[in-house]
Image (spheres, helix red, strand yellow):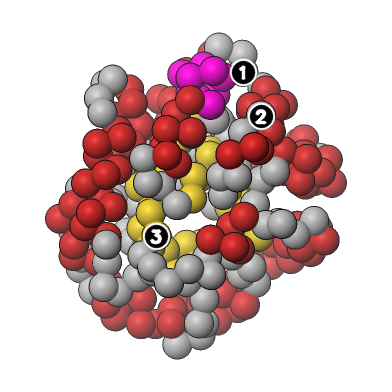
Amino acid sequence: MNKLKEVLKEDKKYLTTFTVGGYPNIEKSKEIILNLYKSGSDIIEVGLPYKEALADGEVIKEAYDYVLQNNIKIDDIFNMIKSLKEFNIPIVIMSYYNLIYCYGIDLFVEKLKESGVDGLIVPDLPLEESLIIKEKLEKEDICYIPLVTRTSKERIKNIVDIESGFIYAVSVNGTTGGHFNISFEIENYIYQIRKFTNKKIFLGFGISNIYDVLNIKDNVDGVIIGSKILKIIRDKGDYKEFINEIKKVLN
């Protein structure tokens, strides 16, 4: 059973939170994922550490570097996620394509299935190159989640056609974690995507507080928060309380 597909059947606004696999260590990472879920996150996105994470801002890159410097491997992260199976947490992996290619596409998909992962995001994989991996994922009942950006324009229809989970709408032209006016033309941007799909649309990049969520929640089905969560974790703050506040605003 794909847990992501099951949770997406619900009629509500969704909160997806992002964390880095293995950060700050394997045991703590497991605890963070579990706490994010228990605190109200509907879906957990787990990033696989990568040295050249072009789509990610400084906070996420710092976490990636920390994990890599501590010699934590992809298999360590897969095993950690597998150990969470009993909690039935909808988990989506975010991985840059070079990691998947070097690991071996077939083996990577096999590990996703074995670990109980429900979806995959590959931020640097062009549409034309994504169909092969999407086909392999479908055979294992794993969702492929495409990214739509403001510059996608005439390509939006083809991008959303390959979706099998939700649509990840990128709110800004830039990296994660920046300070942007994300409400700018959000309504029109999401409308352009909805013209081509009836699937759920989640907005991510640059969402960091309840005011951001208030500004956009009526136009989207869910929000994705990453850098802000990692900042709180890094600074040893109360990310559980932050999630509770966001959930109150969403609902």
Residue to which mark 2 is pinned:
83
Q: Residue at x 41, y 47 (%)?
A: 41
Q: Range of the magenta residues?
A: 22-30
Q: Residue at x 66, y 38 (%)?
A: 85
Q: Position of residue 137 (x, y in %)?
A: 76, 57
As for residue 160 lying within the magenta part, the answer is no
Q: Is residue 153 visible?
A: yes
Query: Given the image, on which type of amino acid does mark 1 rest?
Result: Ile
Q: Is residue 39 left or right of residue 136?
A: left
Mark with earlier residue (1, 3) = 3
Task: In the rendered structure, find residue 14 and report the number of the disc placed on it.
Answer: 3
Task: In the rendered structure, find residue 72 and report the number of the disc placed on it.
Answer: 1
Q: Is residue 247 left or right of residue 181?
A: right
Other residues around mark 1 within 10 Å, as few (<14) / some (14–19) / many (≥20)? some
Mark with earlier residue (1, 2) = 1
Q: Position of residue 109 (x, y in %)?
A: 77, 47
Q: Nearer the viewer, mark 1 or mark 3?
A: 3
Q: Residue at x 45, y 52 (%)?
A: 42
Q: Label 3, secondary structure: give it.
A: strand
